[in-house]
Image (tube, helix red, strand yellow):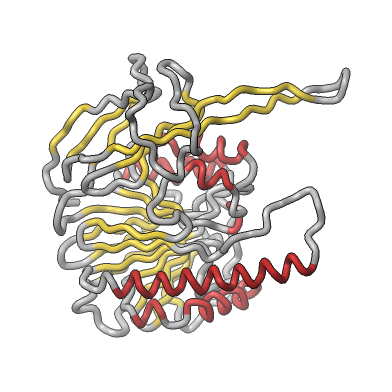
Amino acid sequence: MILRPVRTFNLLLAIAVAVALTAPGCAQEGSPIAQEGSPIAIGPYVQNVSEEFATICWATDAGQVKWGPAGGETTTSGGYEFHSVLLPDLEPGTTYTYDVLMDGSSAGKGTFTTFPEGEHSFRFVAFGDNRNRHDVHRQVVALIMADKPDLVLNTGDLVRRGNQIKDWEAFFEVSTDLMRNVPYYPALGNHERDAQLYFDFFSLPGNERYYSFNRGAVHFVALDSDGPRIQETYGAVTDAQKEGFARRKQRYFERQLEWLKQDLAGHQDFKYVFVFFHHPLYSVKASRQAGAERVREMFGSIFQDYNVSAAFHGHDHYYHRAVAGGVQFVTTGGGGAPLYDIDAPLPESVKWAKIEHFVRVDVAAGRASARVIDINGETIDEFEILPRAVAPAAAR
C-alpha cells in the first residue's frame, strides 16, 4: 500500500478543560466531562476523521445499583456517561497521538492519522454481522488489524440486541484495540433495533442514520435500510399507532432516497463511489430472496443511474458477490454471526462462500483492488474496480 508521508504530533486531550469542544452523537447533551483519573469503561476510540478534524469518544462509569428480591440473589447494573471531544484545525496527512487519562498508563491512549489532501492511495475494510459471537468476531478483528486498514466500514448488526448495554460492552471489548487507532464507520442493522445506545456510542457525519464522507478520490455513502422503529414500551401498541408509524416510516425512506440522489449527483467527479448498508439487494438463500427483492424495489436503479462503484451490505451470514448493471453488490455478513446455507445462486451471482471473512479494498489512482479474506487468512475472492470515468457498463 502506497501512502503519502505523514507528520507526527503529540496531542494530549485535556478532558477536564471546559473549553473542549463536544461533538454531536457520541456524548449526551449536558453530560459532564470525565474527571482526570476516572476509569474508562469503554474506549477510547476515534470517530469521524477528515483532513482537518477528528472526534475522540469514550464512556465512563456513572454509578451502579445492586438489586433483587428481598433475601434473594442480587444483580448489579451500571450506567455510563458518554463523552466525545472534537479536535478541530488539524493538519492533513498528519499522525496524532491522544491520551484521555494522562495518568501514565496506556489505557487512555491512541493514535489517528488525518486524511491527506488530494488523491492518494489507502486501504479500507468492509465487514459486518458480528452479533456477539465473540470468539469468531475476535479472530476476524485480529486479521483486520494485521492488514492495517486506514478506515473500517461495518455493514450493520454489530451486536445481537442494540438496546442491551451488555451486548455493547462485549462489542467494544473485542473492537476497541482496532477502533482506538482506526476510524470506524457503521451502518444501522436490524439488530441495532434503532436503539439510542447506538447513537450514544458513535459520532458520525450528518444525521448519523445516513451520511456520507470523502477520502481522496473516494466518496463513501452509508444508508439506513432498516429504518426507524417503534421503541419497546410497557404498553400495547394499537393498530392506529402502527398505521401512523408505517406512514412515517415510508416518508422517512422517501426522504432518505431523495437525499441519496442529491448526494450522488453532487459527487459525480469522484473516481469511486462506495455505498454501504445492511440489507442486500441480491440473496443466495432462498428464504431471503423475497426480502432482497423488496430492497431492490426500494432502491430501484439509483446505484446504476449514478454509476456507483460497489455496494457493501450484510444481513445474510456468508460472502456473496453479484454484478448488475455494472455495479458490484457485495454481501459481507461473515463477521461472527452464525453462518447461513447457500441454496439459491442467482444469474447475477459471481462468487459465494459460506465462511466468516472480511473484504479488503486497496484504492490507487488507476484502480481499486478488492480481496476477500476468510477467517483462516485465505483469499476466497478477488476483483478489481476501475475508476468511474473508464468503467465499462458490465465490468466484472
The tally of labels here is 0
The front one of 28 and 1 is: 28
> Is 55 left, or right, of 34 in this rendering?
left
Question: Along the line of sight, which residue is nearer the eye, 206 or 130?
Answer: 206
214 over 9 or under it: above or below: below
Residue at the spot x=46%, y=45% of the render? 25
Q: Which x, y percent locates residue 68?
A: 81, 25
Q: Position of residue 183 (x, y in %)?
A: 34, 45
Q: From the viewer's perspective, is 18 left or right of 171?
A: left
Residue 93 or 394: which is nearer the viewer? Answer: 93
* Residue 381 drawn at (x, y percent): 37, 64
Q: Residue at x 58, y 44 (%)?
A: 132
Q: Is residue 113 left or right of residue 297?
A: left
Residue found at x 31% / y 71%: 309
Task: Give the vertical position of 227 relative to 174 (above or below).
Answer: below
Above or below: residue 215 compared with residue 6: below
User: Which residue is located at x 52 percent, y 66 percent?
Assistant: 225
